[in-house]
Image (cartoon, rainbow, N blue to C red):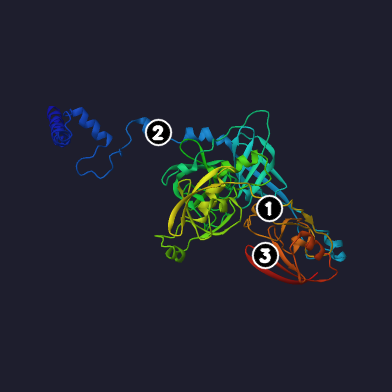
Amino acid sequence: MLLRRLSIALLCAVMACAAVPAVRHASAEENKSEPGLSDVLTDLLHGVEGENGNSGPDKRVPFGREEVQLSFAPLVKQTAPAVVNVYASQTAKVVSPFEGDPFFEEFFGRSQPRAQSSLGSGVLVDPSGIVVTNFHVVKNADQVKVAMADGREFESKIMLKDETLDLAVLKISSDKPFPVIAIGDSDALEVGDLVLAIGNPFGVGQTTTSGIVSALARSHIGVSDSSFFIQTDAAINPGNSGGALINMGGQLIGINTAIYSRSGGSIGLGFAIPSNMVRAFADAAKAGLDFFERPYIGAEFEAVTPQIAESLAMEKPAGALVSSVEPNGPAAKAGLKPGDVVLSLNGKPVDTIEALDYRMATLSIGAKVNFAVLSKGQQATMEIALERPPEGSKPSEITLRGRSPFAGAKVAELSPRLAQRLGLRTDAKGVTVVDINRDSPAADFGFQTGDIVREVNGVTIDTATALEQASKQDTRWWRFTVERGGQILRQVLRY
């Protein structure tokens, strides 16, 4: 036994002698006092590396029971009550191939409407009961219910929705304030930040997943027209749409919207709408607006291609090229001209058109912003006032009736404000479809909101009244031209 104790003591002495010189060497270089044996052992347990250490200076093994038991649980308890389930239902018309045939209807009966439902998530952002979710969760819904994490259910009404942003705001009511998640600043995010995704995937119940911010300012992923997404590897699955993406401060920094997947399940490519856009959209709903108004400057933009960048002597293709400027608009008054390239807005870089659209949409109407512009090879700064889109003369909306392919469509003459409401270029002109009755010939023939009718049976359409008169023609043959998404569609049919 004595021999064993002497062996252990000798081994400890050898270890101490091996460790102390290395520490002494480092201490001498830093002009510090020499540490004792207890200090050396403490540093070793904390993971201080030697001269050939490979880990960074802030990395170490967990020290103490408290650090081993680190958990996201307090953060989840704080935020999860404000994440809700959204149940949307609608009655769909089912058309039977034997519809109208007395023989088959006698035996099989008339086709009955069929109920359809969708499931998603939402986030309470105001104690009065304002819920933010995705547009595609409540699209065409006749009834929307909101279920809380504690089991309570509420009927809701849609305050505001926008298909181009894929956002919707719902309102529920109670005699007590609702739990909320504060909206954070998505511009403060950095790639690598830790995030949590909370929602109801596949309808299994509220679920939390963790991950990091994989990328910022993602665009062209085919989710919505205004693309400027946060990418995360936190697992997002069907049913998570409209749920919360939160940071480590418990703030909402995104609304989970889409995934990229070949199987339908998460493969670590999830996308969320930035919270700064969510805040602007929720504020518009609170203000009682009938649609989400974006600031207007009277200019349209195009992408800067490598060829354009080379012709303008730019180092790389970046920015937004001014394609047109509306006379007497805010941009024209500030001196912006076609051919100029917008490089930044209020000091924040504008690398793409999507970035410019996003930055503009998150700003308030009435504000003045600074544009850094490349004009004729010289950089300049312009201050441009953000205005409300002009409505022009009060547009008269006409619902077309009678026996024509246009029956059931509501049409109006375009103005910058109406064009923005329909997701069109603000310089678009003509007569457009603003709404369609779902059980009408116009819907059956495939007309869509935002279609611009250019010609009907040889008659040029430039006013809503002209289209109304053309749709009353006594004919079974119809030839018309429609502009949709910048493309001209010509159709001939017998009706």
**Height in image: 184 above or below 478?**
above
Q: Is residue 400 above or below residue 89?
A: below
Residue 483's tag is: 3
Q: Which one is closest to the eye, mark 1 or mark 3? A: 1
Instruction: Find residue 111 and report its horizontal and vertical position in percent.
Output: 80, 58
Camera-near label (2 vs 3) is 3
Q: How many marks?
A: 3
| Gap in angstroms between the C-alphas marked 1 and 3 | 16 Å
The quadrant of the image that shows the C terminus is bottom right
Q: Amino acid at mark 2?
A: Gln
Please give the residue where the numbered disc 1 appears in the rendered image. 418
**CA gap, disc 1 and disc 2:** 56 Å
Q: Measuring 28% from the left and 39% from the top, which residue is drawn there?
A: 57
Which SS class for mark 3?
Answer: strand
Q: Residues within 10 Å of mark 2 (few under 14, many from 20)?
A: few
Specify which label sits upstream in the sequence, 1 or 2: 2
In percent of width and height, residue 2 lies at: 13, 27
Q: Residue at x 65, y 59 (%)?
A: 428
Residue 205 visible in the current orientation: no
Q: Report which residue position mark 2 lands on.
A: 69
Of residues 107 and 485, the one drawn nearer to the viewer in this rendering: 485
Whether residue 37 is visible: yes
Of 116 and 190, the residue lying toward us: 190
Residue 292 location in percent, x, y? 63, 46
Q: Judging from the image, what secondary structure is the residue with disc 2 in? A: loop
